[in-house]
Image (tube, helix red, strand yellow):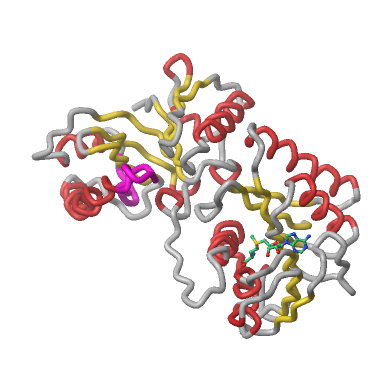
Amino acid sequence: MPLPSLLLFCRPGFEADCGAEVVERLAAHGSAAWCRAVPASALVEVRLADGGDARQAMRCLRLDDLVFARDWFAGLPLTDLPATDRITPVVAAARTLGPFAGCLLQHPDTGEGRSVGRLCRLLQARIDLALLDAKLLRSGAGERLHVLFLEGTRAFVGVSPCANGARWSMGIPRLRLPGAPSRSAAKLEEALLHFLGERLGTLLRPGMSAIDLGAAPGGWTWILARRGLAVTAVDRGALAPAALDAGAVRHLREDAFTFRPGRAVDWLVCDVVDKPARVAALIERWFLDGWCRQAIFNLKLPMKNRYRDAATLLARLRAVIEAGGARVHCSARQLYHDREEITVWLRVE
Ligand SMILES: C[S@@+](CC[C@H](N)C(=O)[O-])C[C@H]1O[C@@H](n2cnc3c(N)ncnc32)[C@H](O)[C@@H]1O
């Protein structure tokens, strides 16, 4: 059954960027589309021109290649859901789409949306049971069912491919980092889990070395040191005792832009708050000079046209490094723990 809408979850305030990115990517694959991106709704609805099928359109994109979308599915709207029985119409719609490997009940990541979250938690077990009774849940199925409640009476029901879907429902990881010196620690932890995934233990291992530029108060240093890396933390500001005590950590009170490592390191991480072009130029130099082979860094997005400017900056960064002779892999994402910024993973292949 054709599904009319592609639904994308993003950070509230970034709907226009998320919509522009997806519409442009679809156009590059020959699919004309338009989007409805209500400001601050944390959701984008993309419709294919000429009644195109969003499920089909998803096949020519990879969620991991999108910067601003945290989760997605192809779906259809359900309206006027009766408060006394929302499950029957949801399961009826699901019958036209299944079977599924699982079912995700979702809501927009806004204050209003989170109040619908309570309804989702109440309904989850009952919907799972109804889907089991209808023989719609099957291990090994290639798609997951999404039920996105906009409010108690309105929802979208649809599917995402298990192999091309979000790592965490709605793109929200539940991380517990007790004792972390800063809230930023969650950004790097999420970045490692998101970008490196199953290769995390291979690509980032005890005994490796890392430089953390703009390290204070030390959340990123703490994450790396706890994973057994020897970390040089560069920041004029003070490091929290928890970071200094987390493992093999030394602190240098130097400027991130003029600091030179004595020798090459395995990892560079950088959370310096500065103009994105200046940070990108700094990262470029580290790769061109062979001072690191992998980096995770943050680009603040103070500009107006955030999608376009970020895409231009990343394309340039990659082109400059590759012109220097190295082939690099580059992934970027506005992570759940990012604010007005995106996080980038760059790796020499
Ligand atoms: C967002 S904070 C970093 C937070 C850190 N990643 C953490 O997890 O705790 C940005 C840091 O960049 C530092 N910074 C900004 N410009 C810098 C520069 N030119 N050289 C060194 N550090 C700089 C600031 O002192 C600040 O501590």
Q: In the image, which residues are magenta?
A: 98-114
Task: Decide if residue 104 is on the left or right side of residue 287.
Answer: left
Residue nearest the observer in this picture, 283 or 180: 180
Picture residue at 24% right of the left edge, 36% below the top: 95
Task: Decide if residue 110 is on the left or right side of residue 123.
Answer: right
In which image quadrant can residue 194 be found? bottom right
Is 239 magenta? The answer is no
Q: Quick one: which residue is furthest to the front in this view?
A: 237
Picture residue at 52% right of the left edge, 35% below the top: 59
- The quadrant of the picture occupied by the N terminus is top left
Ligand 1 lies in quarter: bottom right
Residue nearest the observer in this picture, 104 or 41: 41
- The quadrant of the picture occupied by the C terminus is bottom right
Is 113 magenta? The answer is yes
Vertically, is 337 above or below 214? above
In which image quadrant can residue 240 be found? bottom right
Q: Quick one: which residue is furthest to the left in this view?
A: 84
In which image quadrant can residue 2 be found? top left
Picture coordinates of residue 123 (x, y %)?
Answer: 19, 50
Tally the numbered discs: 0
Picture coordinates of residue 16 (x, y %)?
Answer: 53, 31
Task: Decide if residue 44 is on the left or right side of residue 236.
Answer: left
Picture residue at 74% right of the left edge, 65% below the top: 213
Picture coordinates of residue 298 (x, y %)?
Answer: 67, 54
Vertically, is 46 above or below 244? above
Vertically, is 87 above or below 222? above
Picture residue at 68% right of the left edge, 49% below the top: 299
Vertically, is 280 above or below 2? below
Residue nearest the observer in this picture, 295 or 167: 295
